[in-house]
Image (cartoon, helix red, strand yellow):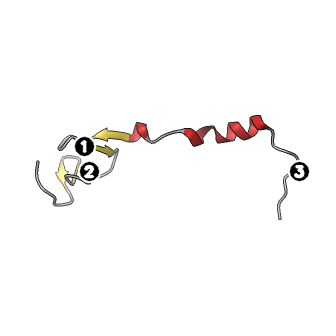
């Protein structure tokens, strides 16, 4: 089994974990059809629209 030769310093450990705190907030936008928040490049789960087309067959707005 692999065992580290030396202790990882607090600085190295924290630099490695620096991206763990990044949130998904930058990937949230509002749906142009219904105005609900949705993830970018995803179908809106409320109205079913993606790129101006109804792809889920849900109600029209």
Find residue 30 and report its image quarter. Answer: top left
Give me the residue at 84% from left, 52% from top.
4
Foreground disc of the pair 1, 3: 1
Other residues around mark 3 within 10 Å, as few (<14) / some (14–19) / many (≥20):
few
Query: Separation of disc 1 and disc 3 at Cα?
Result: 51 Å
Q: Which residue is mark 2?
A: 44
Asked if residue 22 lies left or right of residue 52, the reply is right
Mark number displayed over residue 36: 1
Q: Nearer the viewer, residue 16 or 50?
A: 16
Q: Give the mark nearest the N terminus, 1 or 3.
A: 3
Residue 14, quarter of the rendered image: top right
Q: Tag 2, which secondary structure? A: loop
**x 59%, y 40%: residue:** 19
Q: How far, Cα to Cα, is label 3 from label 2?
A: 50 Å
Residue carrying label 3: 5
Residue 40 percent location from the top left of the image? 34, 44
Residue at the spot 45% in from the left edge and 42% down from the top edge = 24
Q: Residue furthest right?
A: 5
Q: Secondary structure beneath disc 3?
A: loop
Mark 1 or 2: the one toward you = 1
Location of the N terminus by quadrant is bottom right
């Amino acid at each position: 089994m692999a065992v580290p030769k030396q202790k990882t310093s607090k600085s190295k450990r924290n630099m490695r974990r620096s991206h763990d705190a990044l949130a998904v907030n930058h990937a949230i936008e509002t749906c142009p059809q219904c105005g609900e928040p949705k993830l970018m490049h995803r179908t809106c789960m409320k109205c079913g629209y993606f790129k101006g087309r109804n792809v889920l067959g849900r109600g029209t707005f």
